[in-house]
């Protein structure tokens, strides 16, 4: 089953112009990096995919599941894991409790959620902090908690919105290790506006700009767009080529 | 959330025992004069504590809503329905609120020495009131910062529970569900009062649901206010014009009777006093009859606007025979006529009542001081009764007939002094 966007349009309530217009895209298998400048519509797209936002027209589907249909909504939301840009501590909760609570909200029983939280924390290397209050964690640790919250309910597709924003280089390297450790058969979409995040880890590169997909291809194809003799930063050059047409 | 987590983080879990103690204290000191072992009255007076419990659980609920508000979790795409998520957050709040209510009811029953089930209508309504106020508090907590939401939820609910009780007309507070005026032993809870409280609960629940809905827009505050206001308005409309208490006469088919004549009927809660009452009636009825007192065909604890004249209304409050004679003496008197409640024609019958009761008590062989000593005109009453008792039987009959006539009609002066 694949996550697909079919002629989706969306506009924020007080915004004069839509973020997406008749947007159609099917999330490819494997790991996808969604690149784009700030305001390109990346977060909106992932929130629509997670059913945190509803399209004003068109539809989002995961296989036969359509979240606009009441009877599909719970199953759809269980199938799609979404890590928003902002991860907050739930006041009073400890790390494992918060992750287990996220699992319970996604439909796991309390017992299942508690066990799955322990597993998810092992995956993100946070088992040592399981008893710490989430309000005492650093930004990087909180992002790992956010990732554990997405992993806890065993979603069939993961949508990670700017997971490395605000992390230092060591923490970003750590995050890439976590990403590499995820089962390859599970589709993952990682949005970022930092081209530095682009690695061989990803199977597909998608560049979104102004609500329109400007590029879809492999990392090699993306790099191939960099002008010859593009210098030490071919990814940035390729990105600039796509987004601004600079050569 | 696991129980140990709830116990650690929920203010409702820490403060619940204190709330229960406060509710128990209130239940004991508020309206302690519920002397009858009537489960409905005991439940209802204990249920009055909902006016404290409701605002408190609303504040607890606002705190729990604020927890999700601060974490930004309410807007996330959960697989569980919003009401289930809210219910899980409110579980410790509801346990604290309903536990306090249960404790108040239990202490009231224990104080009265009554081993019976509480009235399920009152328990049901109070449960709905507590649940609705907790959910509304939770919804407010989701939409406002906790520093605003917690006091706002408490003050809103406290104002709703306390303000109508402080102003007239008296029926304004019937829709709150805090029914301190329910019920004397001869009364039952008015279905209109129940319906009005449930209507307000429905309004509060709709208001809460409007605030829970995602995505949130400011107009939802307007919709929530409208739902709550409509619920309150409809609740008030249902009880408009009711009497001073949210009651109706109790179903007389449950009366327990001893054969007569005159027959004696008491409510099941007074069953243990029936034999004594029947014995006292058998003793005093012939004496009163011989003295020319018109006796009813039966003495009954039944209350109704249209009680037949053949029924004398009594309340058998104790096993004490002298107390029972006093009750029977009141039951012999004719009911106050409807004209007495209007002001066009003066009603003098009230003045006569104390004198006739004291005379009846004396005739039945009970010292009239038992009654007159509690009356403001006690000295005059005793002097008059002594003077009347010194008269020949025929003149006593005439004195009695004159006073009874003054009680039956408006504008008739009773011949209180035998010389008049």
Image (tube, rainbow, N blue to C red):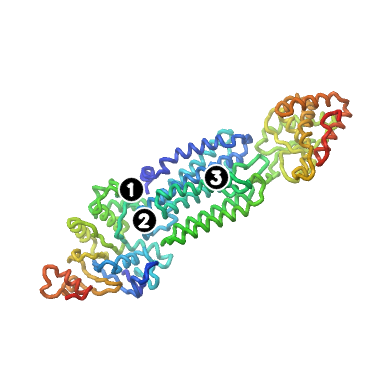
Judged from the image, the secondary structure of the residue bearing numbered disc 1 is: loop
Question: Residue beneath label 1, please?
Answer: A93
Q: Are marks 3 and 2 in contact (CB under 8 Å)?
A: no
Cα distance, mark 3 to mark 1?
Answer: 36 Å
Q: Crowding at label 3, few (<14), some or many (≥20) Cα neighbours within 10 Å?
A: some
- Give how far apart the Cα atoms at labels 2 and 1 are: 13 Å
Asked if both marks, 3 and 2, belong to the same chain, the answer given is yes
Residue pictured at 53% horizontal, 44% vertical = B51
Q: Which of the 4 image quarters holds residue A149?
A: bottom left
> Where residue B294 sits in the image (x, y, percent)?
83, 35
Q: Which residue is mark 3?
A: B162
Contact (Cβ within 8 Å) of mark 3 with mark 1: no
10 Å crowding of disc 1: few (<14), some (14-19), many (20+): many
On screen, residue B401 above or below B248: above
- How many numbered discs sit on the rendered protein? 3
Viewer-proximal residue, A79 or A235?
A235
SS of the residue at dot 2?
A: loop
The quarter in which the C terminus of chain B is drawn is top right
Select label 3 or label 1 by which is in front.
3
The quarter of the picture where residue B74 lies is bottom left
Are both tags, 2 and 1, on one chain? no
Q: Is residue B31 left or right of residue B351?
A: left
Q: Residue at x 25, y 60 (%)?
A: A163
In the image, what residue occupies the spot 55% across and 53% down? B200
Labels 3 and 2: the sequence-earlier one: 2
* Circles 3 and 1 on the same subunit: no
Q: Tell me where residue A81 appears, x and y as whole percent.
A: 32, 61
User: x and y percent of residue A154 in the render?
Assistant: 31, 59
Check the image and report above or below for B23 versus B199: above
Residue B145 appears in view: yes
Q: Look at mark 2 in the image and give the residue it sits on.
A: B73
Question: In the shown orientation, is residue B310 left or right of residue A53?
Answer: right
């Amino acid at each position: 089953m694949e996550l697909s966007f079919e002629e989706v349009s969306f506009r924020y309530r007080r915004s004069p112009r839509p973020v997406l217009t008749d947007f159609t895209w099917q999330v490819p298998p494997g790991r996808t990096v969604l690149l784009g400048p700030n305001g390109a519509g990346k977060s909106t797209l992932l929130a629509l995919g997670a059913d945190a936002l509803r399209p004003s027209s068109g539809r989002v589907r995961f296989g036969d599941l359509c979240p606009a249909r009441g009877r599909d909504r719970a199953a759809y939301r269980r199938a799609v894991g979404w890590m928003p840009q902002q991860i907050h501590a739930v006041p009073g909760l400890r790390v494992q409790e918060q992750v287990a609570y996220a699992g319970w909200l996604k439909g796991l029983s309390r017992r299942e959620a508690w066990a799955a939280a322990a597993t998810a924390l092992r995956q993100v290397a946070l088992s040592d902090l399981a008893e710490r209050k989430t309000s005492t964690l650093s930004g990087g640790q909180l992002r790992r908690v956010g990732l554990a919250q997405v992993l806890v309910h065993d979603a069939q597709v993961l949508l990670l919105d700017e997971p490395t924003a605000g992390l230092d280089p060591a923490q970003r390297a750590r995050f890439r290790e976590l990403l590499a450790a995820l089962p390859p058969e599970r589709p993952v979409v990682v949005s970022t506006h930092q081209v530095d995040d682009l690695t061989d880890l990803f199977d597909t590169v998608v560049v979104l700009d102004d609500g329109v997909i400007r590029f879809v291809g492999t990392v090699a194809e993306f790099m191939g767009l960099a002008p010859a003799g593009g210098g030490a930063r071919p990814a940035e050059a390729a990105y600039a080529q796509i987004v601004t047409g600079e050569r | 959330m696991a129980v140990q987590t709830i116990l650690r983080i929920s203010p409702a879990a820490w403060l619940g025992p204190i709330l229960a103690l406060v509710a128990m204290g209130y239940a004991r000191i508020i309206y302690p004069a519920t002397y009858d072992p009537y489960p409905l009255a005991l439940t209802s007076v204990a249920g009055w504590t909902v006016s404290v419990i409701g605002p408190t659980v609303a504040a607890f609920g606002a705190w729990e809503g604020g927890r999700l508000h601060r974490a930004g979790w309410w807007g996330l795409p959960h697989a569980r329905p919003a009401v289930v998520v809210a219910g899980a957050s409110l579980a410790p709040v509801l346990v604290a609120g309903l536990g306090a209510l249960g404790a108040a009811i239990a202490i009231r029953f224990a104080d009265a020495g009554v081993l019976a089930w509480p009235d399920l209508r009152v328990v049901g309504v109070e449960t709905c009131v507590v649940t609705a106020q907790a959910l509304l508090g939770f919804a407010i907590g989701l939409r406002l910062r906790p520093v605003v939401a917690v006091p706002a939820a408490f003050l809103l609910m406290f104002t709703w529970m306390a303000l109508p009780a402080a102003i007239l007309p008296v029926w304004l507070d019937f829709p709150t569900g805090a029914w301190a005026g329910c019920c004397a032993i001869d009364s039952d809870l008015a279905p209109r009062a129940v319906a009005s409280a449930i209507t307000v609960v429905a309004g509060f629940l709709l208001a809460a649901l409007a605030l829970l809905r995602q995505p949130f827009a400011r107009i939802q505050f307007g919709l929530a206010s409208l739902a709550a206001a409509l619920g309150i308005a409809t609740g008030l409309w249902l009880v408009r014009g009711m009497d001073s208490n949210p009651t109706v006469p109790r179903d007389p088919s449950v009366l327990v009777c001893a054969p007569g004549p005159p027959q004696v009927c008491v409510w099941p809660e007074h069953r243990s006093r029936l034999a004594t009452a029947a014995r006292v009636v058998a003793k005093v009825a012939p004496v009163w009859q011989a003295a020319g007192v018109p006796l009813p065909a039966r003495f009954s604890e039944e209350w109704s606007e249209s009680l037949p004249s053949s029924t004398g209304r009594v309340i058998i409050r104790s096993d004490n025979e002298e107390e029972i004679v006093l009750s029977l003496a009141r039951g012999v008197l004719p009911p106050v006529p409807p004209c007495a409640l209007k002001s066009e024609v003066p009603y003098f019958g009230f003045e006569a009542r104390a004198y006739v009761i004291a005379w009846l008590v004396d005739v039945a062989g009970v010292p009239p001081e038992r009654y007159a000593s509690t009356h403001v005109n006690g000295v005059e009453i005793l002097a008059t009764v002594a003077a009347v008792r010194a008269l020949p039987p025929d003149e006593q009959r005439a004195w009695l007939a004159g006073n009874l006539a003054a009680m039956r009609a408006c504008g008739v002066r009773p011949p209180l002094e035998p010389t008049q």
